């Protein structure tokens, strides 16, 4: 069991947990968080790909990918949260 | 011959029919109605057959023409249409549906003329259909229940006939490989084709069992229409068979047998059914059916033995002409009779009607008699098996027709046909008399008109009187029988025995009178004698006489004997005659 | 770094620039948006001319070549898709100008243009990308903009649908990202060319499958379509037109590209795709038959139509797969144009008569005739009746299936066509029925400016069918695998 | 004379371009609309006359451009096309006049005439299609253009009829598309070639060829209303009278029959089709349709429905003639294409006049209508008698050739079928004529003769077409008559 395997498996596991959460969760916020987990898992996996045997330097491309992914995910999360808030206030209005 | 001249007989009536729809022109068109067939007539009289013209661009290539046979057909058909047109003008003067009648009348006329002139399949069929369908309006004209029923029956048969004709023509044209009638006549057609054609034309001809439409239709149509229906249009069936079937070229013994058998049945069955009808025009219709039975006999013989056709053909044409004129006259006469208001007029018309009736029945040397004899002669060449029967049938048909005619005349008086209101009594006389005259004069005119085709007629025997006589006899018998049926057997017997009973009664009363007279005489004579004796002193004289006698006896051997004077009485019976029971009707009405 | 003003660059960066400017100057947003679109369209036309004359154009971004750097490549298919987004976009924009005119639409007007231009950036980026990671970024851009457009109308239903869309979109993107990651782990490169050269190993196929699922989620392929009807039905008319006409096409385009470049997966996989497509056709149609509102019906029809496009992929063998893209491309173009027209027309109808309940369409005393006509024209293309582009696409699809002996896919296509006739004829009946209106019916006669854009789109959908041959010829320019395989 | 290779396109465009203009005209611009309608219709007649002259001189028109690689959109003007175009051009002109009169005060005129134009454009396109693909395009266009016309009245009944119509015809179109595709895939071409082009396929794979035949004829049979695909036709008669007239006489039903003709003669080729053994079943199906349609017609009281069933029967004459595989029958079939159009359009326009002028819609109300509307009923009578097949009317000519063709092909039963049909025709038409002419109107019935409220634009067209019925029959053997033109076509189809 090499570290990259462990990391990889962990990445997949995290992604899987997130996926299950995203699909099964009822609460809107939970689903956003589950999706975040997914993205973390995916990032893990890519970072594993960047890992090289100690003498070598890690591959920079996956790092770039991961960073991009994080940025994208941050903005997506922001939009999702904004929408959730808006929905809350709309629903509150509708109930009144 | 120009196409226009040949097309004019068709075009003119159509044109008039078209104009008739315009209200402004109606009066004029009705006036022209009798002259609509004139182009046809003049064409037939002036043209030199065979002649023809064609218009390839019309329908499937229209050929019109005139040959010896069709010329004759055109002549008598046109004459009849003329007369019918003239009478229609008066008959429908006050009719609300006169326009409809006029249009149909003219269209039927165009069709009738056209089918006689057409020389190709499509043209023939077109005109045939035009005539048949237009006549529907004629039959239906009065719109009453009888007319509705008759028209329904008529149109049903017409449709069936047309369809059979269509199929027959298609088959025939295909088998002959041509659309010209003259080619069809020479081609070997299949049995199916001939059968279908026979069916199609048989409907028009009214041969049993295809006759059902005919009597009701002729009965229901107005007089001018029935005249042409019966006189002219049913001849289209005959003409069609002559024009299309390969008569004289190919033998169709089965078809011929069927046709002859049908003709034979028709001849007599029509009589049997016809005498039961009470509408005089329907009776005339049945007479037409019966007459067409004769025609069917001729056609059948021709189909069976092609060799005989040459002889049969002219006779059939003649018979057709004869029947057309005689029957046309009878129908028109029916109208004329109906138009009469007075008893005298009716009687006069009845007498005039007797002439065509007798002609139709076949008085010797009349057109009817000649036709029948000529047909007998012509059929002599035909099938030897059938010949005796044919002769018998023809002879008997004279009797049958006489019977029908008698029935017709009687019905005229018993159930007088209705005439439209406001018709002048003399309105129909002229056309009627003209056609009747034509029928009478036919034997004289025919040689002029028909030339060589008239030969069999000219050579025909005048015919015997006895069928006619037998017919009259039978009519009388039938009248008696019918009378008996009407009033019941017992009464009839009473009627029958009445003269004898009357005779007996009279005789009895006479005898009684005689007895009384004798008794009186018995009383009176002795008295008178005694008186005389007293007066003449007979007592002394008697004694003296007695003495003288004794003396004489004593002296007798010496004296010659002297007879006694005898006294006779005058005949006491007066002159007597037999009085038959006087009946207002000769024929019973039941 | 010299600024390279090639049309390829312009077609991506012009909209981006426009979006920023429009965001900063909300009052002039409309004008800026239109100007940007006009310029972008100009750039695309120039690019098309270039491609037509010189063949496919490759532009290495920032001077780095593949496999590391970002290459932009414009071939026939890309340019056609660019053309689609510009043409449809331009006309939808025109329509948006007139439909978002009222004072109550001020907020919408403010955000519509930046979002839409951002969306265009993303889409143009997708069409010009040559590597899958770039695609990932672009589809995320698209997703954010699209969600924004979805919720723009601000109603509860729209926001709810938008959130649902957001979840689906993020999840789809993440699945795609996972796929991308796997591919990188396998191959060490992310460009199409590398993908094309790869040996089809199990892991690679799994990675592709992951990507496919992500894309299926984004393009709403049955049974992952759950988010689409609500999102498309509840957005405002121009937004729906863009979402349905263009946005789903971006994901479809990626599928198409992958089909061109990826190693042949397996018959089973393709059959699965076909089955999912067939399911979409059937289910979408059934839902459309049941839909009570016009826009919902149209949205469900999108589901069905997308399914049909996936049916096009279900062919036998590598040759079949590489051939099937023609039908798919034609269908994508046809659907893009026609569905945009239809949504705009549906929006017009809703605007005019105040509701879009199908059953009561005929009760309205107002008949927006031209919009109805537009709707019908668009329906003709969507049903696939000649001579529309939809017909040609369907023809190509069925021809391919038939040539391969796949009669069942022919049957599915025919069933889909019949079903589409059935559900669209519900709408026609509403248009053409007159006996339930008591009031005198006021029919719009003559031309209305608001109807011009959808009508033009609908006519395009029909007329393009007559130009299918040159169009197909254009699509094949620079077709990478056309020569390779 | 000037040579114009684009002539077929111009003929197509006269009505195709008129459509958008007519759509765009405001409802109240009645005069302008009428002018455009009549102008275009007249122009088309003139162009068609010119075209037919050129074609009879042997000029070949062939316009094509590729839609997909190898798949061409192709317009051609062969004699068979001319036959159909001439029919549609002439009847379009007449029906346009009629429609203008019919819809004088009705709603949605802009829409009506727009689709009307499209419908004719589609028909002309169908006529001039040079291959099955082009045919398919116009065939579908025809469906789409006629649907709004069928439901023009916009009530529940019309919509129901429209839905059924749409389902039938679009399903037919779809199957036709399938067949065309299969033809394209199997034979690599969809071109119409005189004498057919499937001889090789039929030799190599007879089963496939037979299946193809079944699919194509089945698809076309829907529009041609062959039993059992006929149900839409009687239902679609809720359309306004001019639409029914056009539908039954020129456009939809005829398009199907025309398609069958093209497929049998020019896709399969009559010899190939005969060798495949598919013509006899087709003939039998046509015969069944002929009799079935007539039988159903008898029981209908609604005039238009009766006419519709009569169409079911009459149009199958064409199919029968095609399937008999005899040149003579083919002449009959082609001539009937024209003749049936003339007859049926007359009857539908007359029926429309009865409904408009007197409110008479059922046979049982027809008492005395002849007196109330003599011109219209005269036209109707002529057409009905022609249907029965009386000479010298048009129906006789085609029936005659069909019957002779049946004999020629060795199918004597055809005569029985024709006779049966004629008999049934008589059974359902003659009572109508009887009522119209020989019965008096009920005093307060619908047919009570008042002053019919129809103008010359309604009265003249049926009379005109009735005259054409008469002329087409009477002058059947004249040059340029339908019959003569038909012979010309058959000579081409059978001598190659």
Image: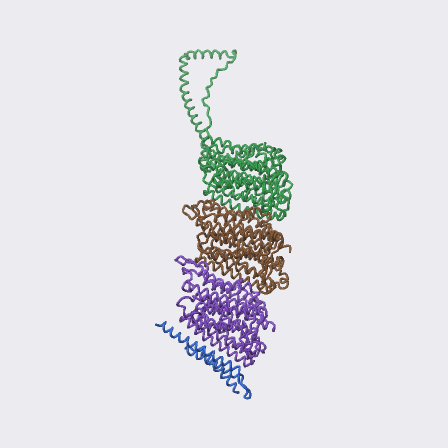
Chain colours: A blue, B green, C purple, D brown
When the figure is inspected, residue B387 is found, relative to residue C67, above or below; the finding is above
Residue C300: percent from the left, percent from the top? Answer: 47, 68
- As drawn, the residue found furthest toward the bottom would be A55
Q: Position of residue B418 (x, y in %)?
A: 46, 37
The N terminus of chain C sits in image quarter: bottom right
User: Is C186 located above or below residue B384 in the figure?
Assistant: below
**Residue B404 vs residue C9, the one in the foreground:** C9
Residue under the image location 50 percent in, 13 percent down: B562
Question: Image quadrant for the C terminus of chain C?
Answer: bottom right
Query: Could one spot residue B256 in this view of the protein?
Result: no
The image position of residue B495, as x and y in percent, is: 45, 33
Q: Is residue B385 left or right of residue B406?
A: right
Q: Nearer the viewer, residue D253 or C432?
A: C432
Residue farthest to the left, as pictured? A96
Q: Is residue B486 left or right of residue D125?
A: left
At horizontal 43% and vertical 63% (from top left) the residue drawn is: C349
Q: Is residue D55 left or right of residue B277?
A: right
Q: Position of residue B180 (x, y in %)?
A: 62, 44
Q: How many marks?
A: 0
Which residue occupies the foreground of this view, D441 or D194? D194
Is residue D78 in view?
Answer: yes
């Amino acid at each position: 069991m090499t570290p990259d395997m462990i990391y990889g498996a962990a990445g997949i596991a995290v992604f899987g947990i997130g996926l299950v959460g995203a699909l099964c969760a009822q609460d809107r916020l939970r689903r956003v968080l589950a999706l975040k987990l997914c993205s973390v898992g995916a990032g893990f996996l890519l970072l594993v790909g960047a890992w090289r045997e100690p003498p070598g330097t890690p591959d920079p491309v996956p790092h770039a990918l991961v960073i991009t992914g994080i940025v994208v995910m941050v903005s997506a999360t922001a939009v999702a949260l904004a929408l959730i808030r808006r929905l809350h206030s709309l629903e509150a209005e509708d109930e009144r | 011959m120009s196409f226009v001249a040949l097309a004019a007989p068709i075009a003119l009536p159509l044109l008039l029919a078209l104009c008739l729809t315009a209200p402004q022109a109606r009066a004029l068109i009705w006036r022209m109605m009798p002259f609509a067939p004139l182009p046809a007539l003049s064409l037939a009289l002036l043209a030199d057959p065979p002649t023809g013209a064609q218009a390839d661009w019309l329908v499937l290539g229209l050929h019109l023409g005139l040959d010896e046979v069709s010329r004759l057909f055109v002549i008598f058909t046109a004459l009849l249409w003329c007369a019918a047109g003239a009478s229609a003008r008066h008959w429908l003067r006050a009719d609300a549906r006169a326009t409809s009648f006029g249009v149909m009348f003219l269209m039927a006329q165009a069709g009738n003329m056209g089918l006689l002139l057409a020389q190709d399949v499509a043209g023939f069929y077109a005109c045939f259909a035009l005539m048949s369908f237009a006549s529907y309006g004629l039959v239906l004209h009065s719109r009453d229940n009888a007319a509705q029923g008759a028209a329904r029956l008529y149109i049903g048969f017409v449709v069936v006939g047309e369809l059979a004709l269509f199929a027959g023509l298609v088959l025939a044209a295909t088998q002959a490989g041509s659309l010209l009638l003259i080619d069809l006549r020479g081609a070997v057609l299949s049995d199916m084709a001939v059968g279908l054609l026979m069916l199609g034309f048989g409907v028009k001809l009214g041969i049993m069992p295809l006759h059902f439409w005919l009597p009701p239709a002729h009965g229901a149509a107005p007089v001018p229409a029935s005249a042409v229906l019966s006189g002219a249009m049913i001849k289209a069936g005959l003409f069609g068979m002559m024009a299309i079937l390969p008569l004289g070229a190919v033998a169709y013994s089965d078809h011929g047998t069927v046709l002859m058998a049908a003709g034979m049945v028709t001849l007599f069955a029509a009589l049997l059914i016809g005498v039961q009808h009470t509408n005089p025009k329907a009776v005339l219709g049945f007479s037409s059916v019966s007459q067409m039975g004769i025609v069917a006999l001729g056609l059948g013989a021709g189909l069976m033995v092609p060799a005989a056709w040459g002889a049969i053909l002219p006779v059939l044409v003649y018979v057709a002409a004869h029947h057309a004129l005689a029957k046309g006259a009878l129908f028109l006469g029916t109208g004329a009779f109906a138009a009469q208001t007075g008893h005298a007029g009716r009687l006069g018309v009845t007498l005039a009607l007797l002439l065509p009736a007798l002609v139709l029945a076949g008085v010797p040397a009349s057109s009817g008699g000649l036709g029948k004899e000529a047909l007998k002669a012509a059929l002599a060449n035909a099938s030897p098996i059938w010949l005796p029967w044919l002769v018998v049938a023809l002879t008997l048909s004279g009797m049958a027709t006489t019977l029908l005619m008698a029935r017709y005349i009687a019905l005229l008086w018993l159930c007088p046909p209705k005439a439209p209101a406001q018709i002048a009594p003399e309105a129909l006389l002229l056309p009627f008399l003209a056609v009747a005259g034509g029928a009478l004069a036919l034997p004289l005119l025919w040689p002029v008109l028909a030339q060589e085709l008239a030969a069999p007629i000219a050579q025909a025997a005048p015919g015997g009187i006895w069928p006619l006589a037998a017919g009259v006899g039978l009519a009388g018998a039938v009248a008696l029988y019918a009378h008996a049926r009407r009033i019941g057997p017992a009464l009839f017997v009473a009627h029958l025995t009445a003269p004898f009973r009357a005779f007996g009664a009279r005789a009895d009363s006479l005898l009684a009178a005689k007895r009384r007279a004798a008794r009186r005489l018995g009383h009176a004579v002795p008295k008178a004698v005694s008186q005389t004796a007293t007066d003449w002193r007979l007592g002394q004289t008697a004694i003296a006489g007695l003495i003288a006698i004794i003396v004489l006896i004593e002296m007798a051997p010496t004296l010659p004997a002297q007879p006694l004077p005898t006294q006779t009485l005058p005949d006491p019976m007066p002159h007597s005659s037999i009085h038959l029971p006087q009946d207002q009707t000769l024929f019973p009405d039941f | 770094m010299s600024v390279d003003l090639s049309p390829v660059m312009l077609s991506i960066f012009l909209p981006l620039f426009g979006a920023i400017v429009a965001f900063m100057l909300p009052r002039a947003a409309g004008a800026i948006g239109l100007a940007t679109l006009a310029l972008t369209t100009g750039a695309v036309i120039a690019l098309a001319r270039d491609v037509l004359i010189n063949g496919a154009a490759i532009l290495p971004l920032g001077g780095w070549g593949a496999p590391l750097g970002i290459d932009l490549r414009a071939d026939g298919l890309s340019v056609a898709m660019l053309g689609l987004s510009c043409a449809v976009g331009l006309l939808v924009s025109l329509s948006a100008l007139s439909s978002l005119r009222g004072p109550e639409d001020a907020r919408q007007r403010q955000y519509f243009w930046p979002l839409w231009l951002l969306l265009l950036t993303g889409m143009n980026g997708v069409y010009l990308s040559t590597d899958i990671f770039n695609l990932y970024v672009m589809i995320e851009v698209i997703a954010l903009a699209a969600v924004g457009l979805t919720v723009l109308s601000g109603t509860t239903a729209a926001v709810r649908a938008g959130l649902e869309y957001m979840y689906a979109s993020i999840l789809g993107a993440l699945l795609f990202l996972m796929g991308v990651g796997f591919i990188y782990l396998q191959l060490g490169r992310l460009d199409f060319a590398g993908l094309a050269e790869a040996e089809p190993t199990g892991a690679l196929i799994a990675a592709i499958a992951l990507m496919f699922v992500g894309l299926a989620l984004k393009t709403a392929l049955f049974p992952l379509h759950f988010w689409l009807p609500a999102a498309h039905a509840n957005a405002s008319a121009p937004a729906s037109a863009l979402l349905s006409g263009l946005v789903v096409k971006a994901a479809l385009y990626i599928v198409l590209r992958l089909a061109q470049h990826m190693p042949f997966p397996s018959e089973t996989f393709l059959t699965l795709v076909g089955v999912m497509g067939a399911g979409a056709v059937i289910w979408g149609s059934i839902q459309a038959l049941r839909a009570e509102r016009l826009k919902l019906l149209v949205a469900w029809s999108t589901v069905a139509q997308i399914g049909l496009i996936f049916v096009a992929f279900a062919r036998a063998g590598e040759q079949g797969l590489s051939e099937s893209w023609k039908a798919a491309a034609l269908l994508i173009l046809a659907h893009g144009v026609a569905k945009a027209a239809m949504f705009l027309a549906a929006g017009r109808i809703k605007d005019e008569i105040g509701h879009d309940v199908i059953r009561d369409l005929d009760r309205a005393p107002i008949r927006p005739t031209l919009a109805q006509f537009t709707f019908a024209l668009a329906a003709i293309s969507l049903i696939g009746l000649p001579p529309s582009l939809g017909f040609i696409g369907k023809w190509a699809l069925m021809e391919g299936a038939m040539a391969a002996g796949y009669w069942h896919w022919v049957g599915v296509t025919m069933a889909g066509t019949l079903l589409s006739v059935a559900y669209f004829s519900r709408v026609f009946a509403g248009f053409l029925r007159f006996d339930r209106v008591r009031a005198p019916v006021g029919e719009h006669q003559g031309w209305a400016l608001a109807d011009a854009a959808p009508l033009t789109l609908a006519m395009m959908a029909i007329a393009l069918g007559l130009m299918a041959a040159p169009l197909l010829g254009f699509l094949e320019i620079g077709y990478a695998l056309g020569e390779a395989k | 004379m000037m040579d114009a290779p684009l002539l077929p396109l111009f003929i197509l465009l006269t009505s195709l371009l008129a459509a958008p203009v007519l759509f765009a005209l405001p409802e109240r611009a009645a005069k302008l609309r009428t002018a455009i309608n009549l102008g275009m219709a007249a122009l088309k007649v003139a162009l068609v006359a010119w075209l037919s002259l050129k074609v009879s001189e042997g000029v070949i028109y062939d316009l094509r451009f590729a839609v997909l690689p190898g798949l061409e959109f192709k317009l051609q003007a062969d004699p068979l096309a001319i036959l159909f175009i001439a029919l549609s051009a002439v009847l379009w002109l007449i029906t346009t006049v009629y429609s203008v009169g019919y819809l004088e005060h009705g709603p949605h005129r802009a829409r009506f005439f727009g689709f009307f134009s499209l419908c004719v454009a589609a028909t002309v396109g169908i006529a001039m299609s040079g291959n099955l693909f082009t045919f398919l395009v116009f065939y579908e266009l025809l469906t789409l253009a006629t649907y709004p016309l069928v439901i023009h009245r916009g009530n529940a009944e019309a919509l129901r009829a429209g839905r059924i119509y749409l389902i039938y015809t679009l399903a037919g179109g779809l199957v036709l598309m399938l067949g065309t595709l299969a033809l394209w895939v199997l034979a690599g071409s969809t071109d119409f070639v005189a004498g057919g082009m499937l001889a090789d396929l039929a030799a190599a794979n007879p089963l496939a060829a037979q299946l193809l035949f079944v699919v194509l004829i089945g698809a076309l049979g829907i529009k041609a209303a062959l039993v059992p695909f006929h149900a839409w036709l009687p239902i679609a008669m809720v359309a306004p009278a001019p639409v029914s007239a056009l539908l039954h006489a020129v456009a939809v039903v005829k398009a199907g029959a025309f398609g069958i003709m093209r497929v049998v003669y020019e896709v399969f080729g009559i010899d190939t089709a005969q060798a495949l053994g598919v013509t006899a079943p087709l003939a039998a199906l046509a015969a069944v349709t002929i009799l079935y349609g007539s039988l159903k017609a008898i029981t209908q009281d609604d005039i238009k429905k009766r006419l519709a069933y009569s169409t079911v029967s009459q149009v199958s004459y064409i199919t029968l003639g095609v399937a008999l595989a005899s040149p003579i029958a083919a002449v009959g079939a082609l001539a009937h294409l024209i003749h049936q159009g003339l007859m049926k359009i007359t009857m539908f326009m007359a029926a429309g006049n009865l409904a408009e002028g007197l409110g008479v819609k059922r046979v049982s109300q027809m008492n005395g209508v002849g007196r109330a509307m003599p011109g219209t009923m005269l036209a109707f009578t002529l057409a009905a008698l022609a249907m029965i097949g009386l000479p010298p009317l048009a129906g006789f000519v085609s029936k005659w050739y069909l019957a002779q063709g049946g004999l020629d092909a060795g199918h004597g039963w055809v005569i029985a079928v024709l006779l049966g049909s004629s008999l049934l025709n008589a059974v359902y038409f003659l009572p109508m004529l009887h009522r119209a002419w020989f019965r008096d109107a009920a005093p307060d019935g619908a047919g009570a003769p008042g002053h019919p409220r129809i103008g010359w634009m309604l009265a003249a067209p049926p009379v005109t077409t009735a005259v054409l019925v008469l002329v087409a029959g009477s002058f059947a053997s004249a040059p340029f008559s339908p019959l003569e033109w038909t012979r010309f076509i058959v000579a081409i189809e059978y001598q190659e």
